[in-house]
Amino acid sequence: PPRKGPLPLPPRPDISFLKHLGRELGVAFEESATATPTKTLRIFTVQKEVLPAFFAAGQSALVTGVTVTRLLGGTGGCIAGAEVKAFDGTTKIARARVFVVSCGGIESPRLLLLSSSEQFPNGVGNAHDMVGRGFNEHPNVSFDATISHSWGTLSPTNKVARTHQFYSAFRGEGLGSIYPVMRQAWVMPNHIATFRASNLPRMIAAGLSRVVRAPLFLGAGIEMKISPANRVTLSRAHTDLFGNPIAHLIMNYSEEDRRLLDRGRGLLRDWLRRLGARGVHELEVAWSRHHQGACRMGRSPATSVVDADLRVHETPNLYVCGSEVFVTGGAMQPSLTIAALALRLADHLAGRLRAG
């Protein structure tokens, strides 16, 4: 943002009431770009929306029921194959001219680290101990409150509005970006809030009280400061069903992260005060489940894992694609950037394979 034109699909649901609240605050709220299902009523499912076109293309094969457990080194620093295992103990080798690791922000670095060998003693792509480093997420401060009912609050549909107006508001203080969100939902719970049984009585009471006053949720996700100490490593104590170490995550806040979370709290509390909200309750800091940065992109193998084309620096035929290559997480949702990088990598690989 800001966009040069409208979103390619008409926005839904209608968030005009949330925009009205924003105007009272002098804040411009916007619709969120959201995957729109065509095969189901609400939930976008890959197996119904994406895989049929994948199979119809006739150029690909999907192998299910097996797990890639390590990458096998070949000559010239190349990857010669991927070891795959089934739960019954069957082991086979998948071979290809080019390999793309796209296992998510935690499992991609784990697979590279598991693939240690004589050729790659520290794991694939890890000659400079950079695989796994720089992991970051989007912590969220958030508040539940209630406001008076009106015609705009009577819809039970889950509605979300976000604003980019404050994205760089605290950059002058040496802090990261912030991405506030306003949410209205009678029925749906806050999907990123941590569920605890001890909170159940309050949740039930809050649900019943919605008949009297309308619920309102305000939150803000922040950009974490990148730290090499925040990293994905291999566990020394626990293994998976194949006997391989599971991922071990080390992640801590920086002082800048804590200050930015406090700035977010102050901003949201001020909005709630100005809206006349009651029953304001701060929730536990929640995570967006955006796993980013642990195979970061860069020009130098000494400070990154993949280059500008997402190719692992020391491995000519291996690429990594996903939010794990992000240099910073910003405060935005990563999905559109992941999709853009995937399309860009597909074009690059098509050109490379055509050229032989």
Image (cartoon, rainbow, N blue to C red):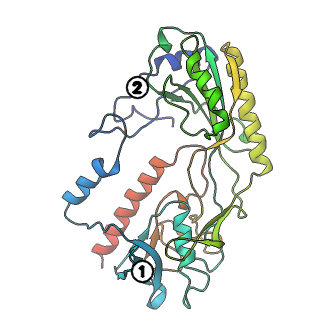
Whether residue 161 appears in this view of the structure is yes
Other residues around mark 2 within 10 Å, as few (<14) / some (14–19) / many (≥20): few
Residue 53 is left or right of residue 25, and the answer is: left
- How far from the left and from the top, in percent, is residue 146? 62, 17
Say what amino acid the circle numbered 2 marks.
Pro
**Residue 13, numbered circle:** 2
In the picture, the quarter occupied by the C terminus is bottom left
Residue with the mark numbered 1: 83
Q: Residue at x 71, y 34 (%)?
A: 264
The amino acid type, in three-letter code, at marker 1 is Glu
Q: As displayed, is residue 208 above or below residue 113?
A: above
Q: Nearer the viewer, residue 111 or 309?
A: 111
Rendered residue at 56%/64% (across/down): 297
Q: Quadrant of residue 304?
A: bottom right
Estimate the spatial distance between the alpha carbons at disc 1 and disc 2, rounded to whole Å. 45 Å
Q: Earlier in the sequence, mark 1 or mark 2?
A: 2
Q: Nearer the viewer, residue 27 or 205?
A: 205
Which of the two discs, 1 and 2, sits closer to the camera? 1
Mark 1, secondary structure of its residue: strand
Q: Secondary structure at mark 2?
A: loop
Q: Residue at x 53, y 15 (%)?
A: 20
The residue positioned 37% from the left and 80% from the top of the image is 90
Q: Which class describes the residues within 10 Å of circle 1: few (<14), some (14-19), or many (20+)?
A: some
Is residue 168 visible in this depiction of the protein?
no
Query: What is the total number of numbered labels drawn onto the structure image?
Result: 2
Do the residues bearing badges 1 and 2 touch, measured as CB atoms within 8 Å? no
Q: Report the front residue among 301 and 19.
A: 19
- Whole-percent x and y of residue 114? 55, 77
Specify whether 24 is left or right of 230.
left
- At which x and y percent is residue 119? 54, 89
- x, y (%) of residue 64? 33, 66
Residue 271's quadrant in the figure? top right
